[in-house]
Amino acid sequence: MATLDVPRKNYGKLRQFINGKWVESHSPNYAPLYDPGLGSIIGEVPLGTKDDVDEAVNAAYEAFKSWSKVPIPDRLQYLFKLKQILEDNKELIARVNTQNHGKSIGDSRGDIRRSIENVESSIAVLLSLSKGEYQREIASEIDEVMAREPLGVFAAVTPYNFPVMIPFWFIPYAIALGDTVVVKVSPVTPIPMTYVMELIAEVFPPGVLNLVHLDNSAVEYLVSHDKIEGTGFVGTSSIAMKLYSAAAASGKRYIGGGGAANYAVVMPDAELGNTVETLVHSKYGNAGQRCLAIQNIVVVGDDNYYNKFKNSFVERTKALKVGYGLNEGVEMGPMTTDQYRRNVMKKIDDALNEGAKLVLDGRNFTVNGYPSGFYLGPTILEDVSPTMATAREEIFGPVVNLMRAKELDEAVSWINAGKYHHSAVIFTQNGKWARTFSNEVRVGNVGVNIGVAAPVGWFPFGGKGISGLGSHHPQIDTVDFFTDRKIIITRWY
């Protein structure tokens, strides 16, 4: 269906992709889908049931029996074909991504680039890291082999904020290693991944890759299904913990990427121009709807330095081009739903009631020509303490807290005492400060003069505590997650 115009005016009622075919959901219930920049309905998504789960998992289970035996050189060709289709259609996918999510087209292009990067990384996995080990003579005339084996069917349960990229944290690795997959995408932004499935529907044998749209009540059933070996999840920490419990109770493997309330520490020797520019994009990219977004900016320095940084940051933020994401040059689009916009506005009100002061108010923001869009302007708060809810709880919107610390150690203690342990960054030209920070902050991803510490596909995507549940992390770390080690000890008389 790659020949159809993109974006489309209406995507109609989405269907499930199961066993190589597009099929109607067993559910009669559908939810509306929006173009958040326009505020208009562009489709409907089924709220699938346990029957949809059974159909998809059973198809994947049957497909595993043959897919796991496909020779590695042949499996490699499927991945090359997948990569080429994504490359050929990356601009179309990015446009669909922006239309249903709202993010700027530049952000969407970056998302799709990262999706392709993970396919490339999975090819490297297939060629090297999936190999086993062999040792002769562990005892007299006895040899020992460790072989990696695929396990079966895995689920990927992914969030609304990166509709294509996060599914590709899991899909190519599982498939490369010989497993089969059932992907459950967010009912808020299911169109981009559905469009990708239209493009790649014929790449893999039926049942190897399946896409389902489910009601939230059916997700726990998917995770604990008797034919599911494990689940890769990314979303809020509360849901991550709930599904972790369900997986553990069923004896399943689990990766759970959760939320964040990330810190950036600006030291008094930071290069101001680059630091401000980097932090503005770190905070307001994706309209702040990403786990890697900076929420709390801690300035270490005297009053003069703090004011200099604040004035520069405010000035650049005011110049940020906010608008419809498909328009070139837009730096920040709308919130993805009107409810998400209202949720963040409520958090701003709560922060003011806690004692925070408003430096820049985005609550009554409008975009000319788009009166019905779900827009929320960039917002800046100051006089925020680390004990306030606005600093501790995840905001997930275009709101930044300006904070002040006397020294680096104080800032590090705030980070380590936080609720989440996802990411933290420091801006400095001092190697000792950077080294101290990198070694002492208790987070999974650290940036030095980097606003978004996003690991590339051939590194694990980190996270500690309730930001990273389970034994492994997304991306390359899933090599151990999607395979088991079989030990074979032999002696021949």
Image (spheres, rainbow, N blue to C red):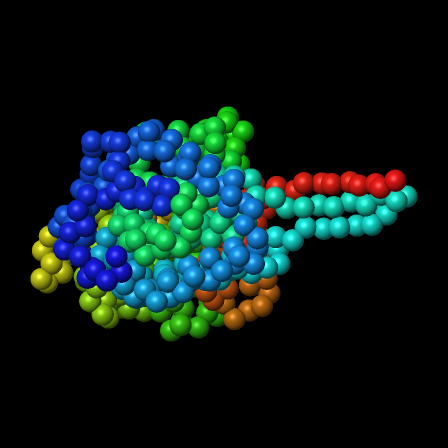
Residue 433 percent across, percent down from the top left? 56, 63
Indicate whether 85 appears above or below 329: above
Q: In this view, does 434 lie to the left or right of 326?
A: right
- Residue at horizontal 30%, vertical 60%? 93
The quadrant in which the C terminus is found is top right
Return the residue found at the far right: 140
The reply to whether residue 223 is in sight is yes
**Residue nearest the observer in this picture, 37 or 17:** 17
The quadrant in which the N terminus is found is bottom left
- Residue at horizontal 14%, vertical 55%? 9
- Residue at horizontal 26%, vertical 53%? 101
Q: Is residue 70 left or right of residue 285?
A: right
Residue 361 percent across, percent down from the top left? 21, 55
- Residue at horizontal 75%, vertical 50%? 134
Return the residue found at the far top: 249
Indicate whether 177 appears above or below 449: above
Residue 106 percent across, percent down from the top left? 30, 66
The reply to whether residue 139 is in sight is no
Residue 316 percent across, percent down from the top left? 28, 68
**Residue nearest the observer in this picture, 18 or 348:** 18
**Residue nearest the observer in this picture, 462 or 28:** 28
